[in-house]
Image: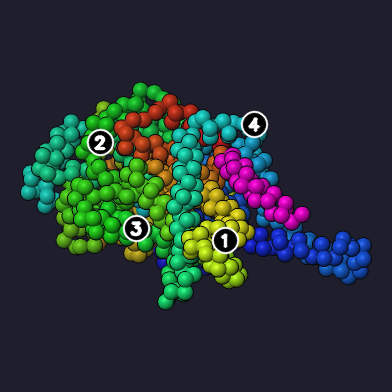
Amino acid sequence: MSTQVASPAAASRAKQPAPRRGGGSHKLSAGDKGVLAVMVGIPTLIQLILVWIPMVLSIALSFTKWNALALSDIKPAGLSNYDFVLNNYPPFWPAVEHNIIWLLFLAVVATPLGLFLAVLLDQNIRGSRFYQSVFFTPVMLSLPLIAIIWQLMYARNEGLINNVLGTANGPNAVDWFGDSSINLWAALIAATWRHAGYIMVLYLAGLKGIDPSLREAAAIDGASSGQTFFRVVFPSMRPINIVVVVITIIEALRAFDIVYIINRGTNGLELIGALVVQNLVGEGQVIGVGSALAVMLLVVSLVPITFYLARTFRRGD
Amino acid sequence: MIDAFSKKSGDTITINTVPHNDFQNNINTYLQGSPDDAFTWFAGYRMRYYAAKGLVAPLDDVWEGIAGNFSEGITKASTADDGKKYFVPNYNYPWGFFYRKSVWQDKGYEVPATFDEFKALCQKMKSDGLIPIAFADQDGWPAMGTFDYLNMRLNGYQFHLDLCAHKESWDQQKVKDVFDNWKAILPFHDPAALGARWQEAAQTLAKKKTGIYLLGSFVTQQFSDKTVLADIDFFPFPEMAMEGTEAVEAPIDGFMVSKKGGDNQAAKDLLAFAGTAEGQDAYAAVDSSNIATAKGTDTSKFTPLNKKCAEVIANAKSISQFFDRDALPAMANNVMIPALQGFIKNQTINTANLESQAKSLYAQQ
């Protein structure tokens, strides 16, 4: 998550020196070259160890069968893992569907909600900082705490929601976790609760960075506050908007923790991320199948990432 | 128990305690890295699997000294495919139908011996306004207990083992029969099962909302109220087609020695000690919710329920280890959990798909 946030800033920072120096790399002294080599080399090495090597290994393993014991037990399997996932693994297609629903829900509900909160809290209302902390807290909470909080909300007989609805302890009690037609929405509300706070903080930063003279100019030209926001303020936050779009897509693709704490991603809560975790690191470890799932997720994730990178670089030219 | 052994032998033992689930997930890496000499594990598929892979040391020399301490069922469960023993049992807990004696007395229920009597009992409970069978399957594994018992009672213990080892096909009438019989009793189960954990289902039994609950004897940990606890009894899964009640689901926890530890006599001595009544008493002094496996352990502190559990296990001809221990973990976790949850929800099961998944997954090993 943090790399996604940091990368645009880092990318634009890295680009700036080049035009200023006017392509004078041949003028660098030996010492400069050494410093440059270290500065480029260390991040590249970290990237290589943490990103590229595991990625290449995952791709390789997805074409093998392996019991995760000795390396000599790795056997080639061709496309059989992919065939298994696509044709024989019942949770796979529901997981794809749920990931798409997840993405739409975040894009249509959670992200706009985060923007809305940011705009509200940017109005210098009293206690703004307090509300900011409140809405941002879910982003920082650890997983076990999140589990407890939502258990308290959703539990069938003891939960807050069913008690407020007055259905607790009765036959009409809503089974938020167990009923596979609604548990996805219950999980999405929990996800929104976290996602909105995250987006809010990004947009708050964006709103603070807008030159007040822009708003003044709009006001002088007679724009209403709605027009000012949608025609002037929002478009001028374009860099943030792109980051938010990418974050929303990535969050939807890698979503897994909330369903995992509910029931490990079964019974209506299948998500690709949860299937990857179950097959790669869980008790039911099947390296080949897990890797195949991870590679599929990777390929899908590459689409928004490529899109994002293409845009960033084009702007730099 | 470790203290008791150190005192007796003068060997120094260091203990490395890890949370159960983490250890279970990391066992593969653990055994290949630098494992401790002896470690706790359980009987079943993976015990035999690691034995076949040569990652653990055979303990036949240890067993020479302790063989007399264990029943036939437990001895069988400690033996791997090559006929050698790799496992020293420590304790286990039987699965059965737990109920509240006071409810049964009030309503005049009697322990059913056959499956037909069992269904009649459920019907009666239903008309008395109870949910007959408490049930919770949000976590996915508890339903495997029902599956195992139906399978063993219908098709026998050996079929259970062969099915778990995938020597038998899933796509056959015997397996379909299991689900058909299950379908007959599914309406008696708590309909809220998929959104509840076993702790919640245990509470429905304690509150007298449900009549019986099929679970391991660890269910009693949930009854903190002493009067409730004293009111709990259990009966074995009733007889069906193949065999009576001589096969019991009673997962055994115990000790194994890593390949490296096989050369360490102290590790073996420790396990030999663990396999005696004295060693198991020392263990039970700390944790009394389980039943020691060795003969001659101190039963004076046993509640009547403990005694009954111990008796059922002692009389068992075969002891199964629960589906997720007897079968390939991937089969249990990745295939059976969703399949059984789907069955509970829709009352349909696709045995052809179970078989094709089993084929792919067992071939990965």
Q: Which residue is labeled 1 in the image?
A: A232
Seen in the picture, residue B19 relative to A78 is either above or below; the reply is: below
Reply yes or no: does residue B297 show up in magenta.
no
Q: Position of residue A291 (x, y in %)?
A: 59, 42
Which structural element holds mark 1?
Answer: helix
Question: Callout 1, which amino acid?
Answer: Val
Question: Callout 2, which amino acid?
Answer: Leu
Q: Which residue is labeled 4 in the image?
A: A78
Q: Residues within 10 Å of mark 4 (few under 14, many from 20)?
A: few
Q: Residues within 10 Å of mark 2 (few under 14, many from 20)?
A: some
Kindly report which numbered mark, 3 or 2, lies closer to the viewer in this rendering: 3
Magenta part mainly helix, strand or loop? helix
Reply yes or no: does residue A314 show up in magenta.
yes
CA separation in Å, label 3 and label 4:
43 Å
Q: Is residue A226 visible?
A: yes
Q: Which residue is labeled 3 in the image?
A: A151
Question: Callout 4, which amino acid?
Answer: Gly
Q: Which residue is labeled 2 in the image?
A: B186
Residue at the (48%, 60%) spot, across then down = A226
Residue at the (53%, 48%) spot, across then down = A253
Pointers 2 and 4 within a single chain: no
CA separation in Å, label 2 and label 4:
42 Å
The N terminus of chain A is located in which quarter?
A: bottom right
Q: Is residue B311 visible?
A: no
Residues marked 4 and 1 touching at CB (< 8 Å): no
Which structural element holds mark 3?
Answer: helix
